[in-house]
Amino acid sequence: MKLVVVAVVLLLAGCSSTPSSGPSEPTSQPTSAQPTADDTAVDDHPGRPHQVGVLVGSSLRDVRRALRGEGLTIDVRRRARCAPGVVLEQSPVPGTKVERGATLHLVVSEAPAAATCIVPPGAAAVRALRDWALGDGPPPAFADRVRLLVANIPARTLSDDEAADRTSWNLPIGYAERRDVRILEALAEAPMRETGVPHYFCPQRGQALPADLLRRLPWSSTLVTRSPRACLEVVAVQVWAGAGGRITDVNILLGTP
């Protein structure tokens, strides 16, 4: 079965409801939706079992495209969330083998019926982090623990005091033909700009984000250089923020020259 690219960054350009206690709480109750004609794919491989991949974090459009021809039905339930069209939950779980004609049950985000258009916490946090990297502002607000990731893989966890120390952001990790990874220097030196919905790593080489970050994609924001589709010429810094806009996770991806 074709695998779905799960690490899709969905930066909000539209509306969302104001987050209260965090992204794990729905803003409305899920409502059932009957599968449409597009949800059932023609079975190109009769009699062959299918192994369910990781669907959470992907767009519903990508899921349908990846499952086309696999003979599976998608049952969609909706839940009010920012970043409409993102898979929030799935059943069966990844790795489950199902027979042809089986139904995959997905909970997919949809825009709230009534919402206040706001900037998600991650967008403000990533700008504050870059201002600090450039020397144009004080250290941003950090959570008690800040996880640093390199190419989607956790590399180091900092206390809030360590996070406020610039040298803590220099990681002795060889990556993309570099001897080490310097997150703040990457933010300060490159012409970073906010971008929308890129595949922010090369799928052929990339590793999926940790599951907890996939669930919180709508609460993240990313700055990139050059074209996000040019896998070999991209620097991306993605920031997640939690309660009060405090930075919880920072992920850096570097292309190779």
Image: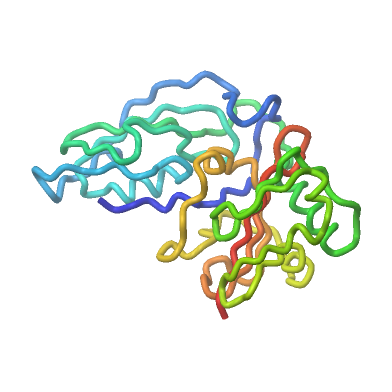
Seen at 43% across and 65% down, the residue is 205
**Horizontal side, residue 197 vs residue 139: left or right:** left
**Horizontal side, residue 144 vs residue 147: left or right:** right
**Residue 178 at x, y = what percent?**
62, 75
Q: Farthest bottom residue?
A: 257
Seen at 48% across and 40% down, the residue is 85
- Asked whether 239 or 110 is in front, the reply is 239
Q: What colouring style does the render use?
A: rainbow
- Would residue 221 be visible to someone looking at this image? no
- In the rendered image of this protein, does residue 225 appear above or below residue 87? below
**Residue 86 at x, y = what percent?**
49, 40
**Horizontal side, residue 32 vs residue 223: left or right:** left
- In the rendered image of this protein, does residue 91 appear above or below residue 219? above
Q: Farthest left residue?
A: 47
- Asked whether 242 or 14 is in front, the reply is 242
**Horizontal side, residue 205 vs residue 181: left or right:** left
Displayed quadrant of residue 197: bottom right
- Would residue 133 be visible to someone looking at this image? yes
Displayed quadrant of residue 152: bottom right
